[in-house]
Image (tube, coloured by chain):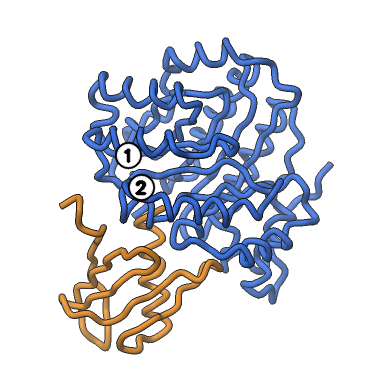
Chain colours: A blue, B orange
Amino acid sequence: MHFGRNETDISNFDYHLPVDAPMTKSILRGSRPANEFQAYVGAPKWGYKSWIGKLFPTGTKEANFLGKYASHFNSVEFNATFYQIHSPERMFAWKQMVQEVPDFKFCPKFPQSISHIRRLRNAETQTNEFYTSISVLGTHLGPLFLQLPDNFSPKGFSDLKAYLITLPTEVPVFVEARHKNWFADKAERDGLFNCLRELNIGAVISDTSGRRDCLHMELTIPHAFIRFVDCGNEQMDLLRLGEWVKRLKEWKEHGLQSLYFFIHAGDAPSLSLYSYFIANLNQELELNIQIPGETLN
Amino acid sequence: MEDQNPAFSFEMEYAGNIVICKIIMQAQSYDILFDNRFMASIAHTGEWTWIQESGVILPDSTIEEIGCRIESEYR
């Protein structure tokens, strides 16, 4: 299953975004003006066989997907780092594949050995190994995201806070909470987001049709990391993405400094959602992000 | 429960039979059980394919199907 994708009847689905949380307004109001707003849009991985013959030339080998991907997108949600901590040599090879795209960013996901197996406890060795590995990416390293296990509830708050405090501050980190109790109880919710704000750590906003509680609209830093999951109905998804363009325009005008937006569109994703979103984002936020499959202006 | 490694199950066809496939996360790989019997351990290659590390040799199509399930489950 895709997180929250198949848990609702979209015939009665309200595609509008919730209003911003008070903290979001406060954070943006206090944000220093960015020299240049940075926006990155990408997919959950760089290789889909279904893109061969469309985005990728016919005959493209899997080993060459990344280089081709980077010629169309400026970022990737780097989920490969979830499954294992890769060697620095492996990271260097991936970095080399995007060297012709100076602004390309990898956004690594914290490894399962840290988040899901150790559940953030006694993970110092693994964390050091992970940071050593991803540091090889250099200027291609984007923010990291830590996805908490589905059953990681507010009962684990002390473990979460203790872990986050130990992280290096040089690399931005976003946290994705999924357990319903983080959002159902105001005290737990406030505790989480206040903690992230105090630690200068971001909150991943997950927009998925079946879990509207995760669409919390809380910015704990003046940067946004959004994971958008399609609902299987393209017309509805276009409306949802249109909502995001409007909101992001407001956020940018009020002080948002950077955006990382990843569209999850199934196992054989159509490029239409990416194209629609990027084209509208470019127009409304006055950006010039390449539209996949098209030549940059 | 929370101290157990994450796991999930689903039905799939294997060798002409429907089996309950249970996937148990390990630090850098996943154990695969068919009807509660250990069959194999598979790992992500980093290039969006999966390889078998140990156990009964499974068809590539079976490994690919299970790998897709894992990617969806923890996306």
Instruction: Determine which of the numbered discs, if any, sits on residue B45 in the image.
Output: none
Judge left or right: residue A181 versus residue A162.
left
Mark 2 is surrounded, within 10 Å at the Cα level, by few (under 14), some (14 to 19) or many (20 or more) other residues, namely: many
Contact (Cβ within 8 Å) of mark 1 with mark 2: yes
Residue B66: x %, y % from top left: 36, 71
Judge left or right: residue A143 versus residue A166.
right
Residue A52: x %, y % from top left: 64, 68
The residue at 39%/24% (across/down) is A195
Instruction: Tell me: residue A228, above or below residue A218.
Output: below
Task: Determine which residue is flagged by label 2.
Answer: A3
Task: Determine which residue is flagged by label 1.
Answer: A178
Residue B44: x %, y % from top left: 46, 69
Q: Chain of mark 1?
A: A
Let me know if residue A54 appears in the view: no
- Of the 4 image quadrants, the one containing the N terminus of chain A is bottom left
Instruction: Tell me: residue B40, above or below residue B67.
Output: below
Residue type at numbered disc 1? Arg
Residue type at numbered disc 2? Phe
Instruction: Tell me: residue B41, above or below residue A145.
Output: below
The CA span between labels 1 and 2 is 9 Å
Let me know if residue A1 appears in the view: yes
- Of the 4 image quadrants, the one containing the C terminus of chain A is top right
Is A76 or A171 nearer to us in this picture?
A171
